[in-house]
Image: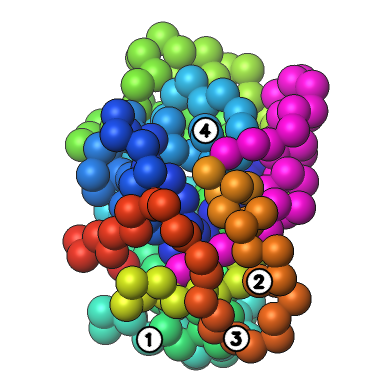
Amino acid sequence: MVYSIPRDSLAEMADDHGGNIQKINAAYEIGKAKMAKKTVSQFLGLPIDYSVTVDMGALKELVDFVREFTIDTVIDVNLNGQVIPQGHHHLNGDQALAYSRMRYQDPRGDYGRQLRQQEVLKQVAQKIQKPKYLMNIGDLMTKLGQKISTDFTADQVKQLIRNYHQSSGEIVSSQLLGKTAWLNGSTYQIISTEDLQAASNRLRENLALPEQTLTNTETRLNDMNPVFFDDESPTTYFNVRGYNVTRYTNNTD
């Protein structure tokens, strides 16, 4: 299962201090994979034992490796010299990278980008299971080099490939959707408790874990703002009294 979290989601950083509220993508910038895992774990109420960090350059290598990537786009994409007009296209790695990174030209913004990124990842996963690619997986890992980092051991990676290489056709994807709030000079996405709980339930079920009522800083903040999601204005102030809201200025694009 693939679940996308909005990069601007209001979330408490899983550090040693507590009460530090930022955009969720700041967790990796501040504390790398360790903090990102802990932050997402408490955000969705599920255990996260391992992580894989994929550099954008790795995506290019993956698409070039499978050499069979096609899309049907209803929007024009223009990023870093790569121009992809509306229609059906066969993309190389550089083009697929631009397709999955662009967000400002998409009327859905980051949410549209999430769907395109899911499309790219699912296509790569479906194609890489073919024997002609599996036979050369060692060459791929050499090319990826430092573009991918993980706390899986080499033996665990091999076991994952053996056990799950034929399950890519069963990949289910979804995304969390939030409402925009204006805080401390920046906009954030606020995810409702209902949606957080639904995502937690779905992911825990996928891990064969029982449902667990989600109680965290995000749900407590939602309780402090009972009419926030009833307000129809596109951008609304959100009460975070008692928490330190920081706008981390080095967030990735």
How many labels sit on residues?
Answer: 4
- The residue under label 2 is 228
Q: Position of residue 164 (x, y in %)?
A: 63, 24
Query: Which-is-in-front pick, marks 1 and 2?
Result: 2
- Could you tell me the amino acid type at mark 1? Asn
Query: Which-is-in-front pick, marks 4 and 3?
Result: 3
Gap in angstroms between the C-alphas marked 4 and 3? 29 Å
Residue 144 shown in magenta: no
Query: Which-is-in-front pick, marks 2 and 4?
Result: 2
Q: Position of residue 28 (x, y in %)?
A: 31, 44
- The residue under label 1 is 78
Gap in angstroms between the C-alphas marked 1 and 4? 35 Å
Determine which quarter of the picture holds residue 103: bottom left
The reply, left or right, for residue 75 in relation to residue 98 is: right
Q: Position of residue 96 (x, y in %)?
A: 43, 66
Gap in angstroms between the C-alphas marked 3 and 2? 11 Å
- At mark 1, the secondary structure is strand
